[in-house]
Image (spheres, helix red, strand yellow):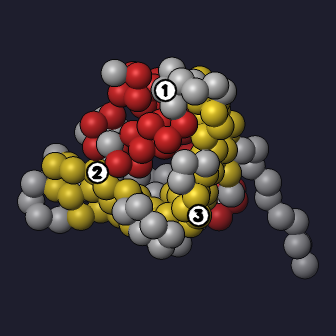
Amino acid sequence: MNTQTIQIAPVRKSIIVAAAQAHAFDVFVNRIDRWWPKSHNIGEGTPLKITIEPREGGRWYSSHENGSEAVNGHVLAWDPPNRLVLSWEISAQWKSDSRMRSEIELTFTAEGSKSTRVELLHHKFETMGAEDGKTMRDTVDGPMGWSGLLETFKKEAEA
């Protein structure tokens, strides 16, 4: 019997934002609709609003012009303005799938009164299986993935 467990390297990103810690956290969660690209959605049709419900157990989802909603994940840990952990319930085929349970952990660390280090760890790709997990990992680590998203977030937080 083969009991080998696959391991897929996590994605780690870090960015310094010229904004106070509480503001950076607030922009990430409560203004995600202003910085998350509408092209990065898994629902049907154009998303009207992207929401992270601000509590443990809250949904991270998009509402669409046709009345539908698409769940990206859920809030697994809620510790404003220090830490946020989200599940990523999206398949390698870019469909909402609650069986997919990789995780995104964000920490917000004050580096002075007007600067915050935001560190992102996206891991547990193994929950998707070897092939799909590696595909998703490579995609979110690419230029259209977390690096670009964090830059877009930074612009909104510093505006």
The residue indicated by pointer 3 is 77
Count of numbered circles in the view: 3
Please indicate whether residue 156 sits to the left or right of residue 21 in the image.
left
Locate residue 19, reporting x and y percent: 49, 26
Name the one closer to the observer, 129 or 142.
Answer: 142
Relative placement, left or right, of 116 versus 43 is: right
Disc 1 target residue: 19
Disc 3 crowd rating (10 Å Cα; few below 14, some 14-19, many 20+) is some
- Badge 2 vs badge 3, beta-carbon distance below 8 Å: no
Q: Position of residue 130 (x, y in %)?
A: 69, 56
Rounded to the nearest whole Å, what is the CA distance between mark 3 and mark 1?
Answer: 23 Å
Residue in view at x 79 percent, y 54 percent: 7
Which class describes the residues within 10 Å of circle 1: few (<14), some (14-19), or many (20+)?
A: many
Identity of the residue drawn at 61% across and 48% down: 82
Q: Would you place residue 39 above or below residue 156 in this image?
A: below
- Whichever of callouts 3 and 1 sits on the residue coming sooner in the sequence is 1
- In the structure shown, which secondary structural element does the residue marked by tag 2 occupy? strand
* Mark 1 residue type: Ala
Question: Which of the two residues, 73 or 9, is positioned nearer the viewer here?
Answer: 73
Disc 1 to disc 2, C-alpha distance: 22 Å
Mark 2 lies on residue = 50
Q: Is residue 118 above or below residue 75?
A: above
**Horizontal relation, residue 137 to residue 146: left or right:** right
- Sequence-wise, the earlier of marks 2 and 3 is 2
Q: Which of the two discs, 1 and 2, labels the residue nearer the N terminus? A: 1
